[in-house]
Amino acid sequence: MAYSNKVLDHYNNPRNVGALDKSSQEVGTGVVGAPECGDVMKLQIQVEGDRIVDAKFKTFGCGSAIASSSLATEWVKGKTLDEAAAIRNTEIVQELSLPPVKIHCSVLAEDAIKAAVEDYKKKNIKAAPATTEAQA
Amino acid sequence: MERTCPACGTALNSPLVCESCGELLEPEPGLTPFAVFGLEPAAEVAADALRKRLLALTRRTHPDFFGSDPGARRRAESNTAALNEAWDVLSDDIRRANWLLGYLGGPDEKAERDMPQSFLLEVMEWNEAVEEARAAGADTDATRTLTTLEAELLAERTSLVTRIREGLLPLPTDTDRLVELRRLMNAVRYLDRTLHEIAELRLSHASSR
């Protein structure tokens, strides 16, 4: 099976590889995995207000999984949380011309974005009432 | 088993061959791995007895004994293949558990993929350790750390396999237990991938010496 040029480009020059401070209040972290193949993907977003200002990823998996997560970090930057969470795996499939056997890689990337957004929201909803509970 | 041999009329113990007269049989399609050995699906198999049975049946079905008759030879090949495939599933704890989970109507790894974040973070760390050792090369601290990690992962695998075997006794039917078993099997999958990577890295380090 041949990888598309876009997959190869992201694979050879992955964008935004790295890590953000997981403990930071402004950072949401999503870790997802594909039990079919054992791939794991970590995607982190840095949020200011309602907007994602930075994103990093680290993926252990095949070329398509790396390309999908690399593309995902490019796409979420500058988007609001809701816009990012609305990214569909089918858009990733289309952009990277992923073959049917690699669709699960794009699903992984979509799930990673959602998980990161969720994590950020959970952190920041919890943060507010936590103080009130502590006082009570 | 109720069937009798169409050639000699003896009651059959195997769906593949008559052990009395040696007649090769045409099995019904869709035989389960257990049925190939004349067994009912069960959590555990007696490995020694099963291996003896495999050898005894293979002595009856091996294609080398049917060299002169092309039709019989094809039947022998397909029956021997059925025996080997069934053995592969039944003799491996994880493959047997995986088959049983499907048979019991449990979720496959596509339907049940949720793993705790803490576990997935751990998987990330294992992969990072492998990556570090790969970059550092043979006979480095990073590579020695990997030997410790490998021992830990093997121990964890053993304990997961034990939990899976125990979880199948008796064969469960309630969804919660089936889901729990799938999660344990998924964990084994992640472990196996890392163990495989460590083994490959060791090979490449050994050959670069």
Image (cartoon, coloured by chain):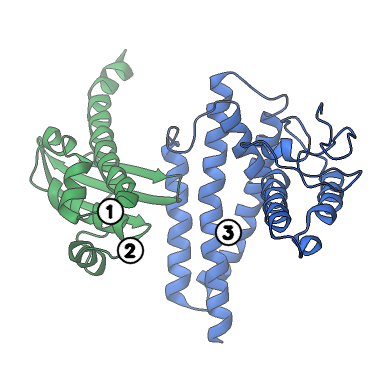
Chain colours: A green, B blue
Residue B95 at x, y percent in the picture: 63, 44
Write down the residue under mark 3: B149
Q: Quadrant of residue A125?
A: top left
| Depth order, front residue of B88/A67 | B88
Q: Quadrant of the N terminus of chain A?
A: bottom left
Dot 2: element: loop
Q: Amino acid at mark 3?
A: Leu
In the picture, the disc for residue A1 is 2
| Residue B178, placed above or below residue B8 | above
Which percent across, then down, holds residue B118? 45, 40
Q: Secondary structure at mark 1?
A: loop
Residue at the spot x=85%, y=35% of the render?
A: B12
Discs 2, 3 touching: Cβ within 8 Å: no
User: At 66% from the left edge and 45% from the top edge, which residue is drawn?
Assistant: B89
- Which chain hosts label 1? A
Under circle 3, the secondary element is: helix
**Residue B67, numbered label:** none
Dots 1, 2 in contact, CB < 8 A: yes
- Snapshot quadrant of residue A26: top left
Which is more toward the observer, B129 or B167? B167
Q: In the rendered view, does A76 fall on the left or right side of B154?
A: left
x%, y% of residue B88? 68, 50
